Amino acid sequence: MADGTRGKGDRKEPPDDEAALSARLQRLGERLDNASRPSENVSGPRSAADASAYARGFRMSTELVAGVLVGALIGWLLDRWLGISPWGLIVFLLLGFAAGVLNVMRAAGVVRERQLND
Amino acid sequence: MDPIHQFQIINLFPLGKLGHAEIAFTNSALFMLIAVVGLTLFLVLATAGGKAVPTRLQSAAELSYEFVASMVRSTAGQEGMRFFPFVFTLFMFVLTLNMFGLIPYGFTVTSHIIITAALAITVFLTVLGYGLIRHGFHFFNLFVPKGVPIYILPMIVAIEILSFISRPISHSVRLFANMLAGHIALKVFAGFIILLGGALGAIGWAGGVLPFAMIVALTALEMLVAFLQAYVFAVLTCIYLNDAIHPGH
């Protein structure tokens, strides 16, 4: 009797239980996809450079020192090339310190990452 | 006894001369060569089978791929995957060199700032080059934050540029300083054992158990640091690349 209730069109498609099975398989596949890459949906561009407190702390200190060093180096070079000593060093050391603080704030996530505005 | 001695570069055989500078095959180059050949062999052998149920070796290769791939996706987005080969190479290279440093009689290549600086500058130039090619002159808008009053804009731009230039420095110094400090600490504690034994005889050698325990603990910590610093180096590479790929994020 079960065969009789089915129309001709049904024969082209798989039987009901098989269709249900493939639907379930598809759903499982989707769920697996979602589970295996949650990162795409959830987190933004910068999620975890901070694997441990030690690494995090070390990162902050190098960020600050790097900013100051670059400022001092550029100021010193400008002094030498332009003969404006000591103004280049004074100005760029201060700017470098500001850049270092900015680096630290970015690394700590206090300030947003830089952006292009267009 | 000299804790710095381990970082000495030794010329193994000369390769030629560049101007007045001698170009030689050093112990540093030897360890880099071993790392590159070893990594290549590892990945080629691991992926040769391509079984559905992976062997142990294949599983290790797949794990490292997945690890780096998810890191790149989460920090630089799907588009960042075009830089996956670059990041994967950097990560595996640095990780292997860090780990080699922990093998007794090994040489820590990454404890030399010239190596880490070269890697960091490569990343820096890649970011700069790709950003300029992709966004053209627009890339420099990176240094001009939106909504800043015009009278302090010059100062902000100068600070942003300095902050950008300071990246390769902090990037390279972090890896170098961590490796250097860790290995010096290990050698200093090892030196304590010899000092104690030499000064106090049998009691000293017995007391040497304490610094020895410290070395065991430090070695475990160094393993963690070696992995962590390779990871941080790679993650920062991704974050910097993210600027070049989609700065409008």
Image: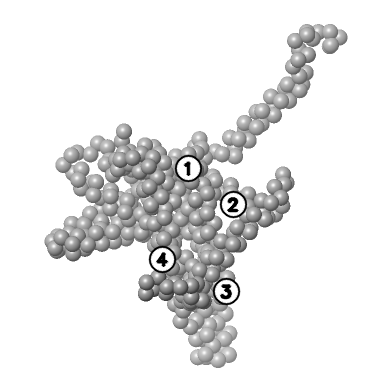
Let me know if residue B32 appears in the view. yes
Q: Nearer the viewer, mark 4 or mark 2?
A: 4
Residue at image point 64% right, 54% down:
B44
Label 2 marks a residue whose chain is B
Residue at image mark 3? B104
Splitting the image into 4 quarters, where does residue B172 fall?
Answer: bottom left
Q: Chain of mark 3?
A: B
SS at mark 3 in the image: loop
Q: Is residue B111 above or below residue B192?
A: above
> Cα distance, mark 2 to mark 3?
25 Å
Residue assigned mark 2: B64
Name the quadrant containing residue B117. Answer: bottom left
**How far across and down, in percent of the image, does residue A114 sit?**
33, 43
Q: Give the mark toward the camera: 1 or 2.
A: 1
Give left or right: position of B38 versus B2.
right
Q: For the residue marked with disc 1, what is the amino acid? A: Gly
Q: CA distance from mark 1 to mark 4?
A: 27 Å
Other-residue count near label 4 (Cα within 10 Å), few / some / many at <14 / 14–19 / ≥20: some
Within 10 Å of disc 1 (Cα), the crowding (few <14, some 14-19, many 20+) is: many
Tag 1's secondary structure?
Answer: helix
Position of residue A101 relative to residue B249, above or below, is: below
The residue indicated by pointer 4 is: B114
Marks 1/2 in contact by CB < 8 Å: the verdict is no
Q: Quadrant of the C terminus of chain A?
A: top left
> Quarter-wise, where is residue A80 in the image?
bottom left
* Mark 3 and mark 4 residues within 8 Å of each other at the beta carbon: no
Q: Looking at the image, tell me whether mark 1 or mark 4 is earlier in sequence order.
A: 1
Determine if marks 2 and 3 fall on one subunit. yes
Q: Which residue is mark 1?
A: B80
Q: Can residue B7 be seen by looking at this rendering?
A: no
Q: The disc numbered 4 marks a residue on which chain?
A: B
Give the residue displayed 36% in from the left and 37% down from the top: B248
